[in-house]
Every structure is written in C-alpha cells, then in structure tokens.
Image (spheres, helix red, strand yellow):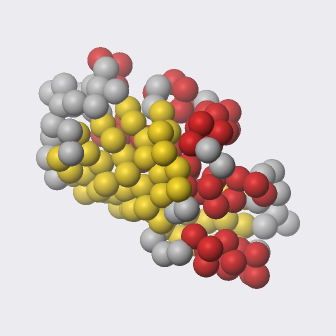
Amino acid sequence: MSAQRIHDMLASIVPFVRTVGLTVTEVGPGTATALLANETAVQNHIGSVHAGALYTLGESATGAVVLGLFGDLLPNVFIALKGATVAHSKARPGDLTALATLDGDAAAVRAAYEAEGKADFDVHVRFEVDGTEVATVTYSWAARRPR
C-alpha cells in the first residue's frame, strides 16, 4: 500500500491524526516515516514539539507500520496498542520526524498472526529534528483475530 493510502486510512480510523496535522510520508515493509510541523498549536513552553504531540506522531508512524502489516484484513482484525516506553534525549525546536521500524521480520509477524490468530510485536521509533535524535519510543502492539 502507498504512504498516501495508509495516511488516509489512518486519518479515517483515528480522527486525532487530522487534528494534530501529521503526515505519513513513507511506508515500507515494517517501516514508516511521519512528519509533524513545529507549529504553535503543538508546541510546549520552550518552543519544541510537545511530548504529547511527539507521542501521537510516533503512535501514528507505528500505526502506519501496523496498517502495512494488517490493513488488508480490516475490519476482520482487532489491532490495539498495548504500551510504550519513552526516552527523551534532547529538547530541540523544529519540525519533528518519526522513523518507525518493526522489531523483527514483517513476514514473520504476519505468518504468526495467520497461524495463531494473534501476534504481539514492538515497533521502535527514532524521533529527529534536523537529523538530531530528540527521543526514542518503543510501542508494543497486539493483533487479534476477532472472536
């Protein structure tokens, strides 16, 4: 699926994606990139992207990875975020890029789901401003066959 198609799916499933104004720009097997402009509406008190907006951008980038894995099965698959681990490294004003990468092989995750009706997996996100890392987050996801 194209990045535009996945972005459109994500924005229709999760209206908050439209509210924040983020964009999914690239999608590959087990990868996705999303961008968020550092505009006043998403800034914190020091002029960088607010941590809540950063988290949303990362969740959306990982959601794009998930849609790349399971989007063809919707609405016959239940997908949910189980948790996340956040590490901030440097506050920096500027447009924020989220680079999401599946932990493991995309085909193996899909095969596990097909065989067992469930798959648990992590997607790691590196956040950058002008090429400098500002945070990392690991998002833990679950895919389940509906009962």
The x and y percentages for residue 118 are: 70, 73
Whether residue 144 is situated above or below residue 45 in the rendered picture: below
Q: Is residue 122 above or below residue 17?
A: below
* Residue 27 x/y as whole percent: 52, 50
| Residue at image location 17% in from the left, 52% down from the top | 89
Residue 114, position in %: x, y? 76, 75
Q: Residue furthest right?
A: 147
Whether residue 49 appears in this view of the structure is yes
Please tell me which residue is depicted at 57% across the width and 70% down the height of the picture. 106
Closer to the camera in the image, 143 or 100: 100
Q: Residue furthest top?
A: 40
Q: Quadrant of residue 136?
A: bottom left
Q: Is residue 113 left or right of residue 90?
A: right
Q: Quadrant of the C terminus?
A: bottom right
Residue 102 image point, x, y percent: 48, 65
Q: Residue at x 25, y 45 (%)?
A: 128
> How many numbered marks, from 0 up?
0
Q: Nearer the viewer, residue 27 or 48?
A: 27
User: Which residue occupies the foreground of this view, 83 or 35?
Assistant: 35
Q: Is residue 77 above or below residue 58?
A: below
Visible in this render: residue 81?
Answer: no
Q: Is residue 19 left or right of residue 107?
A: left
